[in-house]
Amino acid sequence: AQGAPRITAELNDGAAPEDRVNHKRVARVMREAGLSGYVKKRKHRTTVPEPADQVVPDLLGRDFTAEAPNQRYVGDITYLPLSGAGGGGNLYLATVIDCYSRRLVGWAIADHMRTGLVADALKAAAAARGSLAGAIFHSDHGSVYTSKAYAELCQRLGVIQSMGAVGSSADNAMAESFNATTKREVLRDTACFTDELTARRKMFRWLTRYNTKRRHSWCRYLSPNAYERAYTAKLALAA
């Protein structure tokens, strides 16, 4: 499922200078062997717009970067399809992703798209960070994100809400990209998960690996956790 850049980073990690390989060579060898990064697209509507009680501005303006961890987050809901043999229907994954490191700081899975799903993901992020006070959380205009209950939760946690334009996926492109990557690498050529338990197990395994092992191009081909550790080490050296 991995492309030449990530394979190159994996091969060069810890290698002696004379043993390092060039990404062009890796790409050539993969091409000759008929190997390539997995690509798959799937569309499913999970955003249900609802008029908000209050106007929430777009504080990111499609700038999905941050100067340090725990400053800016994006999140979304994506569906996880189940086979008819496993009861059919979908599970839903809600995410909270750090714009600095692309780390999945909070997530939740449920068989519904009610406010409790995104609330659980945000509370998981708050627990992981210790505090989200002063951080921005950016989402689309789905009804769960515009609900009064979610706004109250953000206020309690000190989170500043931000939302893109209604109907514009580009305004939350980072979260959309994470969703696509997740299903592409977990499902691959399988149309759906066989059952709910299998879906939860596979998603837990992949989401954990995403933070700890999966090399991200944004993180200079480090994992999100390693990228944050490098930031902490740099601060310690500067102190």
Image (cartoon, rainbow, N blue to C red):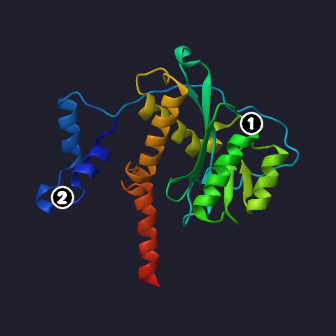
Q: Residue furthest top?
A: 85
Residue at the spot of label 1:
114
Q: Residue furthest left?
A: 18
Which of pointers 2 and 1 indicates the residue nearer the eye? 1
Identified by mark 2, the residue type is: Ala
Residue at the spot of label 2:
15
Q: Residues under labels 2 and 1: Cα distance?
A: 48 Å
Under tag 1, what secondary structure? loop
Identified at 22% across, 60% down, the residue is 14
Q: Position of residue 157 (x, y in %)?
A: 73, 61
Whether 201 is drawn above or below 85: the answer is below
Q: Position of residue 202 (x, y in %)?
A: 45, 35
Question: Callout 2: 10 Å neighbours few (<14), some, many (20+)?
Answer: few
Identified at 62% across, 33% down, the residue is 92
Identified at 68% across, 37% down, the residue is 168
Q: Are marks 2 and 1 in contact (CB under 8 Å)?
A: no
Under tag 2, what secondary structure? loop
Whether 229 is drawn above or below 22: the answer is below
Identified by mark 1, the residue type is: Arg
Instruction: Mark 2 or mark 1: name the one nearer the start of the chain.
Output: 2
Q: Is residue 188 left or right of residue 35?
A: right
Q: Position of residue 195 (x, y in %)?
A: 52, 24
